[in-house]
Image (cartoon, rainbow, N blue to C red):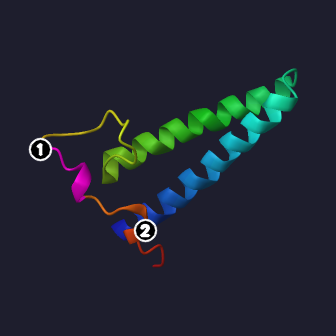
Amino acid sequence: MARHEMLDLLKRIQEVQFGVIETTLFLNTHPGSREALRYHNELARQLHELQHEYAEKFGPLMITSDKFEYPWNWIDKPWPWQINYQY
């Protein structure tokens, strides 16, 4: 079940991250859109929360995470191309 939960959480992070990138691009061409900015900020908040949840349960996703513990184990985690995303 943990693998299933991990993959579901990764998928949700990717979906929300895509939305953050897309709203960023939209705001670059529509800087006066209050609705787009509100939506962007909501997605950015969700992304932060999802990344924090993932780090708490499965370890940090990015090297910039504040969730590293001793001993250093970043190198021990599977690289993105090593993960089998099927369950």
**Quarter of the figure with the N terminus:** bottom left
Residue 82 appears left or right of 25: left
Instruction: Note whether 48 is above or below 2 in the view shown.
Output: above
Observer-nearest of 57 and 18:
18
Secondary structure at numbered mark 1: loop
Residue at 73% from the left image edge and 35% from the top image edge:
24
Please state the horizontal and vertical placement of residue 84, each as a whole percent of the image: 42, 75
Please state the horizontal and vertical placement of residue 45, each as a whole percent of the image: 58, 33
Furthest residue in direction left, as rendered:
71
Residue 26 appears left or right of 68: right
Observer-nearest of 10 and 28:
28
**Residue hosting label 2:** 81
Q: Quadrant for residue 11, please give it.
A: bottom right
Mark 1 Cα shell of 10 Å, populated few (<14), some (14-19), many (≥20): few
Residue at 39% from the left image edge and 44% from the top image edge:
62
Residue at 77% from the left image edge and 37% from the top image edge:
25
**Residue hosting label 1:** 71
Please state the horizontal and vertical placement of residue 70, each as a whole percent of the image: 13, 40
| Span colored in magenta | 71-76
Alpha carbon separation for disc pair 2 and 1: 24 Å
Tag 1 or tag 2, which sits nearer the N-term? 1
**Would you say residue 19 sits in the magenta stretch?**
no
Q: Looking at numbered disc 2 in the image, what kind of residue is underneath it?
A: Trp
